[in-house]
Image (cartoon, grey):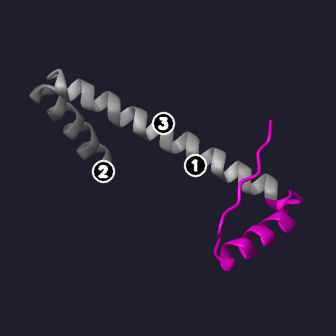
Amino acid sequence: MNTTLSLRVPQNVIEQLGLLADATGKSRNFLAVQAMQDFIEREAWQVQEIQEAIKEADAGDFATDEEVRAIKTKWSRNAD
């Protein structure tokens, strides 16, 4: 089921969307819906990860000093 949604969109965004639609052969509507879906999925994932991390922190589930040192060593070595 589709529903109509009215938005106030800056003119430059509409112009960029039109250029992208022309370049890809997709409709502006298709690209706008795809962009919203991608944004919603990404933000929902991030919110879920944050909520899980808060639960872990509230439960006292933190990395040990040894785990932190191991990660620091790993990334320090790879940075060179």
Disc 1 from disc 2: Cα separation: 31 Å
| Label 3 environment density (alpha carbons within 10 Å; few <14, some 14–19, many ≥20) | few
Mark number, residue 18: none
Residue 26 vs residue 51, the one in the foreground: 51
Q: Amino acid at mark 1?
A: Phe
Secondary structure type for disc 3: helix
Q: Amino acid at mark 3?
A: Trp
Magenta span covers which residues?
A: 1-28
| Label 2 environment density (alpha carbons within 10 Å; few <14, some 14–19, many ≥20) | few
Sequence order check, earlier mark of 1 and 2: 1
- Spot the residue most to the left: 65
- Spot the residue most to the right: 25
| Residue 75 x %, y % | 28, 43
Q: Quadrant of the N terminus?
A: top right
| Label 1 environment density (alpha carbons within 10 Å; few <14, some 14–19, many ≥20) | few
Q: Are marks 1 and 2 in contact (CB under 8 Å)?
A: no
| Residue 6 x %, y % | 70, 60
Q: Amino acid at mark 2?
A: Ala
Say which residue label 1 marks.
Answer: 39
73 sits to left or right of 29 = left
Q: Residue at x 89, y 59 (%)?
A: 25
Q: Residue at x 72, y 56 (%)?
A: 32
Secondary structure type for disc 2: helix
Q: Residue at x 53, y 43 (%)?
A: 42
Say which residue label 3 marks.
Answer: 45
Residue 78 vs residue 19, the one in the foreground: 19
| Residue 2 x %, y % | 79, 41
Question: Residue 53 in magenta?
Answer: no
